[in-house]
Image (cartoon, rainbow, N blue to C red):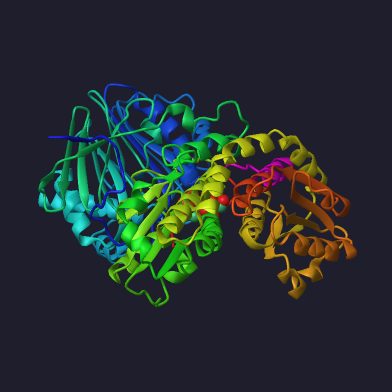
């Protein structure tokens, strides 16, 4: 039996403790179509998860494995002219942790008999012990990976116990520690993929007489909207017309089918040169989508069901602890300023990677906000799992529907930014800010810490954000010119105050990852305590200096930079006549209440980084060493 769930929400599922996970993308197909094009196109969509090496395994008169260091396009070139006919296939795109990225370590791996092929996303922690046992039995290994060890372990069990592959996988998984999502194919059962997960995501798309598998739903979007999110410790036997889910105790589990609310166009470039640019330009509509159905400025209302369901907890919260990484952490920092201002609840913002390893004090009544685009970031996941054990309420702010953090949270709100493919986060960030603004307003209202007048004013301000972002995007070319002018800089400084201080941090992070220019973000006044030593006539200093209550102060900071001949690029508010006399280059954003300013001022900084990266010839959608979902600690 299959149960259809109409809309995926923040439901609580059993979930496991996650250790360090290997990031990678996995795809599979079994059915009447040609498997190779489905698998290879699926891998292209999952390249954001890693792009060190790529491989596919097909069954075409026997097992055929093709793999190569490099990107999916390198593999495609490598296998031109091969007979790739097969109605079953698995594919993998790797982000290397153990074992350097090379052809040998690329997945799929093949078992000693040459009959089984397997791909794996995860880390087998006790692989060394198992490898030793297999070496003693005479096995040889061709790669440095834990994956090849697990595969041969499975084959060894299959041979010795004279059991089928499914049984052998189950026995093997009970012995191993660590994390995995695995897909296996076997020459002896040529229509079946065996899959299992613990810790790494796995989605199975249900078609008519066919099934698709992926690390997320994007590889299967054009074929089916019905998917099953596989849970930890579940094993799937996937045939063209049958999907059997079992737990590791061999008991059948009813698969829940979720209907996807996502269109194919959302994961294609749509005429833009890069996903990052497309995603920056999508922000008027993604922010609108985030507000839609939740914010009604005319009626003076915000309705977020996730907040409503936990309203007593928020009303009485003694503290909010925000845990996140990277750009999501910057959104958390904006939230600290806004929530303390509007709700008068003390807020702490923690790097998830630090929070999880120290011994934080978590009191009854504390609420943890976990912010994550992917919903799969390992440090954030473990941080909330630890906090949950100590009794904290977990509220997730997540973009990817059905992701692990969404599933582990007690309640939450989706950012509704749609799939974010560019490795640098842009539209997910503004989605996070929009959700956090709404939450602060809703909670402030319930707590009585915001006046009716300010509440109403901010509702209208927030409502107007999509339109204002659209207006400022019309001047994107100005940033392209500024980027051209400064593209040869080796360093840059980003300065902001108050609500714009986290935006300075975010601007610096974006520039680093997309253009490889070293950049630092600082509170503008703090600059005098060190970074000012860096100022020379070639250092670009980006001021996020929109009109707010600190405006005069930041003007003074700008003068301090000018006095030392630094180059000033200023993001300022339309109508500001003073700043242009001090700055070398300016970009105007529409006027807004200072609380809403981050939603506008971050956008020109995204564009500036994008154009700098492009001007420097960087592959901005896949900058070196990075991956979209950081599922390693
Ligand atoms: C930067 C960026 C990263 C992520 C970070 C957290 O552009 O994308 O810093 O923000 O890896 O990822 P999520 O939000 O998926 O938890």
Would residue 613 be counted in the magenta stretch? yes
Magenta region, main secondary structure: helix
Number of numbered tags placed on the structure image: 0
Q: Is residue 321 above or below residue 71?
A: below
Residue 389 lies in quadrant: bottom left
Q: Quadrant for the C terminus, please.
A: bottom left
Residue ID at (52%, 50%):
433
- How far across and down, in percent of the image, does residue 28 sit? 33, 35
Q: Is residue 224 above or below residue 506?
A: above
- How far across and down, in percent of the image, does residue 430 sit? 54, 46
Residue 460 lies in quadrant: top right
**Residue 157 can be seen, yes or no:** yes
Q: Quadrant for the N terminus, please.
A: top left
The magenta region covers 606-621
- How far across and down, in percent of the image, does residue 549 sit? 69, 60
Which of the two residues, 70 or 396, is positioned nearer the viewer here? Answer: 396
**Residue 279 can be seen, yes or no:** no
- How far across and down, in percent of the image, does residue 49 sit? 46, 46
Which of the two residues, 272 or 126, is positioned nearer the viewer here? Answer: 272
Q: Is residue 428 left or right of residue 486?
A: left
Would residue 82 be counted in the magenta stretch? no
Q: Is residue 151 left or right of residue 333?
A: left
Which of the two residues, 36 or 180, is positioned nearer the viewer here? Answer: 180
Residue ID at (40%, 76%):
360
């Amino acid at each position: 039996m299959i149960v259809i769930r109409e809309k995926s929400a923040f439901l609580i599922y059993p979930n496991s403790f996650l250790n360090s996970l290997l990031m990678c993308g996995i795809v599979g197909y079994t059915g009447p179509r040609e498997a190779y094009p489905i698998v290879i196109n699926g891998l292209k969509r999952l390249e954001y998860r890693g792009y060190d090496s790529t491989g596919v395994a097909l069954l075409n008169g026997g097992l055929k494995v093709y793999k190569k260091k490099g990107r999916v396009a390198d593999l495609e070139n490598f296998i031109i002219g091969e007979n790739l006919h097969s109605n079953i296939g698995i594919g993998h795109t790797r982000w290397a942790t153990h074992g350097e990225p090379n052809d040998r370590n690329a997945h799929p791996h093949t078992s000693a008999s040459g009959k089984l092929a397997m791909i794996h996303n995860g880390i087998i922690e006790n692989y060394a012990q198992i490898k030793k046992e297999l070496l003693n039995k005479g096995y040889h290994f061709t790669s440095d990976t834990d994956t090849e060890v697990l595969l041969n372990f499975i084959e060894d069990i299959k041979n010795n116990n004279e059991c089928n592959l499914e049984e052998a996988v189950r026995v093997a998984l009970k012995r191993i520690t660590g994390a995995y999502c695995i897909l296996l194919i076997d020459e002896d059962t040529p229509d079946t993929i065996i899959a299992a997960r613990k810790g790494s995501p796995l989605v199975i798309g249900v078609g008519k007489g066919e099934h698709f598998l992926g690390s997320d739903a994007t590889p299967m979007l054009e074929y089916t909207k019905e998917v099953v999110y596989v849970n930890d410790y579940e094993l799937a036997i996937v045939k063209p017309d049958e999907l059997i889910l079992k737990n590791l105790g061999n008991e059948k589990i009813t698969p829940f089918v979720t209907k996807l609310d996502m269109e194919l166009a959302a994961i294609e470039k749509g005429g833009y040169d890069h996903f990052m640019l497309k995603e920056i330009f999508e922000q008027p509509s993604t922010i609108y989508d985030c507000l839609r159905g939740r914010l009604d400025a005319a009626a003076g209302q915000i309705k977020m069901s996730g907040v409503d369901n936990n309203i007593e907890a928020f009303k009485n919260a003694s503290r909010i602890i925000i845990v996140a990484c990277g750009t999501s952490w910057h959104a958390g920092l904006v939230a600290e300023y806004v929530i303390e201002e509007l709700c008068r609840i003390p807020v702490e913002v923690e790097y998830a990677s630090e929070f999880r390893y120290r011994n934080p004090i978590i009191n009854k009544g504390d609420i943890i906000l976990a912010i994550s685009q992917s919903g799969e970031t390992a440090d954030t996941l473990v941080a909330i799992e630890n906090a949950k054990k100590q009794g904290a309420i977990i509220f997730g702010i997540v973009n990817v529907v059905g992701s692990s953090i969404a599933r582990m949270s007690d309640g939450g709100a989706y950012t509704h930014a749609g799939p974010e493919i560019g490795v640098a986060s842009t539209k997910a960030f503004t989605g996070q800010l929009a959700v956090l603004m709404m939450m602060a307003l809703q909670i402030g209202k319930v707590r009585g810490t915001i006046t009716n007048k300010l509440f109403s004013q901010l509702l209208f301000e927030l409502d107007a954000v999509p339109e204002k972002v659209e207006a400022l995007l019309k001047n994107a070319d100005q940033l392209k010119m500024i980027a051209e002018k400064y593209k040869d800089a080796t360093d840059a400084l980003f300065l902001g105050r108050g609500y714009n201080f986290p935006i300075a941090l975010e601007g610096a992070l974006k520039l680093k990852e997309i253009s490889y220019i070293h950049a630092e973000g600082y509170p503008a006044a703090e600059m005098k305590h060190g970074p000012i030593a860096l100022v020379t006539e070639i250092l670009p200093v980006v001021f996020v200096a929109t009109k707010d209550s600190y405006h005069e102060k930041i003007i003074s900071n700008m003068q301090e930079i000018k006095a030392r001949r630094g180059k000033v690029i200023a993001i300022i508010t339309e109508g500001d006549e003073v700043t242009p006399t001090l700055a070398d280059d300016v970009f105007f954003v529409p006027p807004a209440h200072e609380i809403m300013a981050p939603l506008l001022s971050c956008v020109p900084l995204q564009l500036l980084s994008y154009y700098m990266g492009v001007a420097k010839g960087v592959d901005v959608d896949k900058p070196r060493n990075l991956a979209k979902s950081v599922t390693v600690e």
